[in-house]
Image (cartoon, coloured by chain):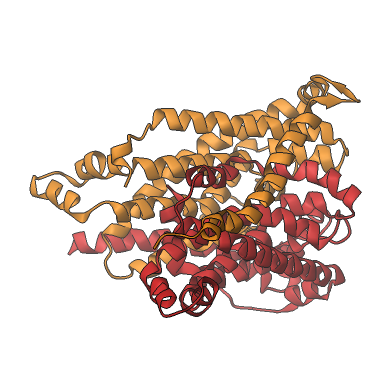
Chain colours: A orange, B red
Amino acid sequence: MRPSVPERGLPYLLLGPSLLFLVVFYAWPLLEAIRTAFTAEGTLGLGNFRTMAADLNFRTALRNTLLLVVSVVPIQLALALALGTLLGRTARGRDLYLYVWTIPLGVSDLAAGLVWLAIMGERGYLNTVLGALGLVHRPTLWLSYETPGVLFAAVVAAEVWRATAIVLVIVVAGMQLVPREYGEAADVFGATPWQRFRKVSLPLLKPSIQTALILRTILAFEVFAVVLTLGGRDLPVLMGEAYNWQYAYENTGVASALAVVILVLSLLATLVYLRLLRVREETIG
Amino acid sequence: MRRRLTPHVLAGLASAAVLVPIYLIALSALSARGEVSAWPKALLPRALSLETLTFFFGVRGVWLALGQSLVVAALTVVFAILLGAPAGYALARFRFAGKDAVRLVVLLTRAFPIAILTLPLAVRFIRLGLYDTPLGVALVHTALALPFAILVTASLFLGIPVELEEAAWTLGCTRPAAFRRIVLPLALPGLTAAAIFAFVISWNEVFAASILTLRHRTLTAYLLAGLNESPLYFRFAGGFFLIVPSLIFIFAVRRYLFSMWGIARR
């Protein structure tokens, strides 16, 4: 059937409203945020970035954010690959496991922070367990600036708990596209499970891994409510600083400068992943 | 025998790692208020009490914030589906110039930090009278949920054979009628799942909701703003209440989780 003329315009008509919406709510804010970031007191320049960099918290926030990204994302990828492989070996109960493991997909970062506050707080469940084991003798304060290591670990735990599910879903979706015969062939030729994973599964999963890493890293640069619930401002991060500059100091210029920093970091990370995990056309599922 | 059991042992451990923290926040929320400072804490639900939750829901601000959250999420669902489903249908059913560019744009939106979206809009919304309104927050949440809705509905419509539609056309149905009578009933479960996803995105969003509201806060923004002042048991009750819908939602959409990401990764 040859489409009539109005028929040919139909896809554009159907897409139009969405695209217009995306332009208004992505392209315009992007340009506006960049303009705001580079305009301080009515003049074009780096004033906001200077104010941002001069702030005592900025360096710590930048360092903490980067450290969180490089700690959380690799753990999540390793866990997701392990759980995905595990899923392939459990015929019975597979659906139940998958449901349970994806529950955190629906949990907000704020709620995740509060969950881990109940565990890691001074009179939380961790201290109860440690007390029962005889490791602590009174409620111990873990989430304070005096124990930055534990505070950091608590944030990592909360992020891994909350956001590994998204990596898992992408990885498992990729695993479903890999034909079962490949793995069976490896078994026939006497490959160990590790060899099979390393030489067969992993290369075929590269596109999924790339997607998962890009998505997860971008989200990890935006870590915010988890940190605020667990550590307040004892563990400054970039997004928390942006929130403070906007909300507490009412300085949209510096807040926008921080947003631009987060954007640049996200883009850099994406480029690195695209380059490191280059996917050749023929391997795309 | 050992070879068979080990995967289930490991999978069970992983499941426990997900569930135990949820159990603990539930336990905190379902204990009496005084329990929050008890040490050592009871790890088993021996003395359940609704006192903490009753207190939580006795706070007027909680009800107002809950109302705001529901209104914002409902608006987000309506906008995301009404805008996203036609776009998804276009991507699934038509070949047209610029299709790949559209896909790319949709995927690129995910590389945007939410701060970049929110900060300029906060300024603009004040001028437009949208600041501190559910509509303003819902518009930003729609921006977050829309790319999702487009990709999800595109994969959904791809899964419905075009032959069914063509059969309806040859039998004299117009395109809209064929869509309404043939495609829509088949797409309804998937559309519901997409709507639920949009709802969860909005219900859980913290940053934009906090920046764009002041007196009419959503539940997440309300809880975040009160973090430093509110007592611990109040925070735990809030955390627990935020999680409850997600347990149900993920169960409802579990069949669609993969079709969503299966297509979204291209």
Write the residue at 83% across / 32% down: A253
Q: Nearer the viewer, residue B17 or B214?
A: B214
Identify whether A82 is placed above or below B231: above
Identify whether B259 is placed above or below B51: above
* B225 displayed left or right of B157: right
Could you tell me how many numbered marks the image carries? 0
Q: Nearer the viewer, residue B55 or B193?
A: B193
Task: Tell me if residue B16 can be seen.
Answer: no
Write the residue at 83% across / 26% down: A39
Write the residue at 85% across / 67% down: B61
* B163 displayed left or right of B250: left
Identify whether B194 is placed above or below A21: below
* B18 displayed left or right of A278: right
* A238 displayed left or right of A68: right
* Residue A266 % position (x, y): 58, 34
Write the residue at 49% across / 55% down: B91
* Residue B55 % position (x, y): 80, 74
Q: Nearer the viewer, residue B213 or A57?
A: B213
- Quarter occupied by residue B85: bottom right
Q: Nearer the viewer, residue B242 or A44?
A: A44
* Residue B207 % position (x, y): 73, 49
Looking at the image, the residue that sits furthest to the left is: A189
